[in-house]
């Protein structure tokens, strides 16, 4: 019973994450670093990483309670 419940919970989390990634403009937030040169480009999603980290931290905090 415990493993089944864990798999269902993980599946629901993955579906929600997929919907959020599809609908939200993640990767194009203000604060993301993008440097484009003549022959190269560099992209680091700093603001996106911070936002995802905060959301995951809050979810984990709620689950632990």
Image (tube, helix red, strand yellow):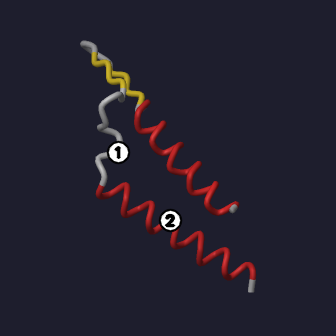
Q: Which residue lies furthest to the front in this view?
A: 65
In depth, the one of 59 and 18 nearer the eye is 59
Instruction: Tell me the crowding category of disc 2: few under 14, some 14 to 19, or many 20 or more residues within 10 angstroms, Cα based.
Output: few
Quick one: quadrant of the N terminus?
bottom right
Instruction: Examine the rendered structure and indicate whether residue 1 appears above or below residue 35.
Output: below
Instruction: Tell me the crowding category of disc 1: few under 14, some 14 to 19, or many 20 or more residues within 10 angstroms, Cα based.
Output: some
Q: Mark 2 points at which residue?
A: 14
Instruction: Examine the rendered structure and indicate whether residue 34 appears above or below residue 20.
Output: above
Q: Residue furthest top?
A: 38
Q: Is mark 1 on a helix, strand or loop?
A: loop
Instruction: Examine the rendered structure and indicate whether residue 35 appears above or below residue 27.
Output: above
Residue at horizontal 29%, vertical 57%?
A: 23
Point out residue 38 in the picture as x, y percentages from the top left corner.
24, 13
Instruction: Examine the rendered structure and indicate whether residue 58 appears above or below residue 53.
Output: below
Q: Name the residue under label 1.
A: 26
Q: Which residue lies furthest to the bottom in this view?
A: 1
- Is residue 51 rendered to the left or right of residue 22? right
- Is residue 15 rendered to the left or right of residue 33? right
Q: In which quarter of the image is residue 36?
A: top left
Q: How many marks?
A: 2
């Amino acid at each position: 019973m415990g493993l089944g419940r864990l798999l269902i919970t993980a599946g629901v989390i993955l579906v929600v994450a997929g919907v959020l990634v599809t609908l939200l403009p993640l990767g194009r937030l203000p604060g993301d670093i993008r440097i484009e040169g003549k022959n190269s480009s560099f992209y680091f999603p700093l603001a996106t990483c911070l936002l995802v980290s905060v959301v995951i931290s809050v979810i984990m905090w709620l689950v632990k309670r």
